[in-house]
Image (cartoon, grey):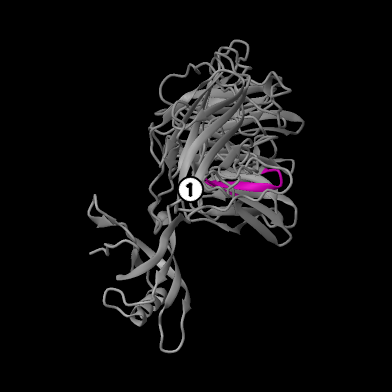
Amino acid sequence: MPAGVIEAAEVSLNGVRYPLIGPVQLSLISLYPEKLVIGDVSKDSQPTASVVAWNDWQGGIGLERMTERDPPNRAWWSTCSLNFKNHLLLPPLATITAASGVAGSFTIGAIGELASEIYVAFGTAVRKYDRLADSWGATLTTLPAVATDALSFRLGGVDYLAFAHTDGYTYTSDGTTWVNDTTDTKLLVFWDQRLWGLSNTGQLWRSTAIGAETNDSTVPLPAGYFNSLFSARNAAGTIILYCATRVGLYAHDATNAKWEVTSFDLPNHPDNGLGGIKWRDASYNSAGLAIYSIVNGANTAVVELVGPDSDHGLPTAQQGTIVKLAGTHAYLLALVDGATEAAAVNMFDGFALGLHEPAVIVEDTGYSTLLGWTERGWEVRWLSASGTAAATAIYVSGAYDRYRVWWGHNRRIYWMDLPIGIVNPDQVTTYTFALSGEHITPWLVPDAKDVDAIALALLVELQRATATETVVVDYAINYATTWTNLGTITTNGLTTYLFPSSATPTGTAFLAIRFRLTLARGSTNTTSPDVVSLTFVYRKKLKPRWGAEFTLDLRGEYLGKSPRQLQDALVTATESNVLVEFTFHTDTAAGNPRNYYVDVRIRGKETTGHDFTGLVDVSVMEP
């Protein structure tokens, strides 16, 4: 039963009641020290509140939770343009071209270019895009099988476009006359002034004259294990051929006409190496949503994981498989297929059982995406609708005198203009934007768990806002999946939202909080609302901890205990390794005392010898 106090000028400590001289001085001891500010002030210099300010989002997506110590340059999920310092804008405009006109269900196998025009293999039907009419015209040739790769190259002074399809490869130099070569070819690459091809069974061939192939060497793996063929530097700095396979990376030894296994090996999976490419100073290999960067040096290699699966990855609905990588001036692009069902893999006997078929493409509820990596972070360049067919092909081109990326998704072809470098939206007025974009911050979780965090205000700075260029602001707390709306901004400048409302700005307690901005534009595609900064002001309040100071009167016997017995009991309470109970009130309304569990400190003024009387100053504190 909790101890209680009956008499005035009395306290109970560790079950023993003591007489007092004077009152008990009770105080709240759980207070943060005031911030010490020397010189110029910053956004976080106010003494009682804390501030998190997002004004640079170049760290990219993929951080679901953050603390106050994390740099505020990340998002959990965003379809907005993040690669502009002090600007959060609508995503770039993606244009869907006309339907191909090819009937039935088919896979867009590959995209290629010839004479600055785009050609696409819709299933087995190859068609050319008419930019002015926005149409794909008639079928130019019918491939013997679905395309697995495409390559534009110049051989013997002639420009060619070839589509590989495992039954061989089909090529043209004018877009009108097409030739079927029956040399088994799944992948194509141009290197060392020669055309190279790799068959589905791993046979590499080379050609210095179109249509005349010479077998070179065989990758020592089962059929169907080969996903990408590209050239990149080896440890000696020499450009060689690499093959990205289901089990890792193989390097071609041209001098001895053989393939060597590299130190970069992976557990067997059909998605490994679907994206294999050289970009800038490294080669990149995908594995599901992971991407490995490999930088070769003198007798060594640095391997680093840089994919969008880093940190907290992607939201469940946006997860998928990287099917292709493509390099641009500003981004490494990753085409993520959200409609791919990963194939089951027998890790014990994949060789013997012949489990070498590609992943099954299904129509699912996922979202496909086009992601861009800037070496600082990932951003979403494009997001598909849900429940659509697979994303399968990507190609970066300067066709039609426009620097664009083209990709295939849901049996249609899309294109998007690409920047040569970083575009300053304050200076460039021709940048085109999508209709809407969503930006979700990480959950902000205060460092200390023993504090109450109280949201006070959210400040949104906006420019280029109008009645049609708007930003909707929402927040969520404590990991809820529902959002609370703060308002819609249609004017420029600084908009301040108080919590829970401007009418009752008492603050909103939270364990974790995040914000969502939904950007939208009107009919002019060169105009976007521009979020300059997002500033969150909150207060951290420690859980209440109480302390008390008082003076005990031990100059005589009290309730049958001598001064020495009271002194001994006080020493026992002070030396206790566990907290002791303290109270100086009984709440008569509730019939219970107000109890605290405390550490004890004493400072006494006692007589000496056999006399244990005296006055003792006591301070008690909740931990």
Prevailing SS of the magenta stretch: strand
Residue 178 image offset from top left, x and y in percent? 60, 24
Q: Position of residue 416 (x, y in %)?
A: 61, 24
Q: Secondary structure at mark 1?
A: strand
Q: Residue at x 43, y 42 (%)?
A: 510
Q: Position of residue 622 (x, y in %)?
A: 42, 61
**How far from the left and from the top, in percent, is residue 33?**
57, 53
Query: Which residue is drawn at the image coordinates 69% and 53% (left, top)?
Result: 254
Disc 1 packing (10 Å; few <14; some 14–19; many ≥20): some
The answer to whether residue 167 is visible is no
> Which residues, given as a range, are shown in magenta?
279-292
Depth order, front residue of 526/88: 88
Residue that appears at 38% across and 38% down: 480
Three-letter code, disc 1 = Lys
Q: How many marks?
A: 1
Front residue of this view, candidates 496 and 78: 496
Report the quarter where the N terminus lies.
bottom left
The quarter of the image holding the C terminus is bottom left
Most foreground residue, 541 or 569? 569
Q: Is residue 132 above or below residue 25?
A: above
Q: Is residue 233 positioned above or below 615 on the image?
A: above
| Residue 617 relative to residue 531: left or right | left
Please check the rendered image and state whether residue 220 is part of the magenta-colored stretch, yes or no: no
548 lies above or below 590: below
Report the side of 597 relative to 221 (left or right).
Answer: left
Q: Which residue is mark 1?
A: 541
Residue occupying the point 43% across, 19% down = 103
Residue 547 shows up from this direction: yes
Residue 372, picture quadrant = top right
Residue, far top: 133
Q: Farthest residue in the bottom direction? A: 609
542 or 242, nearer to the observer: 542
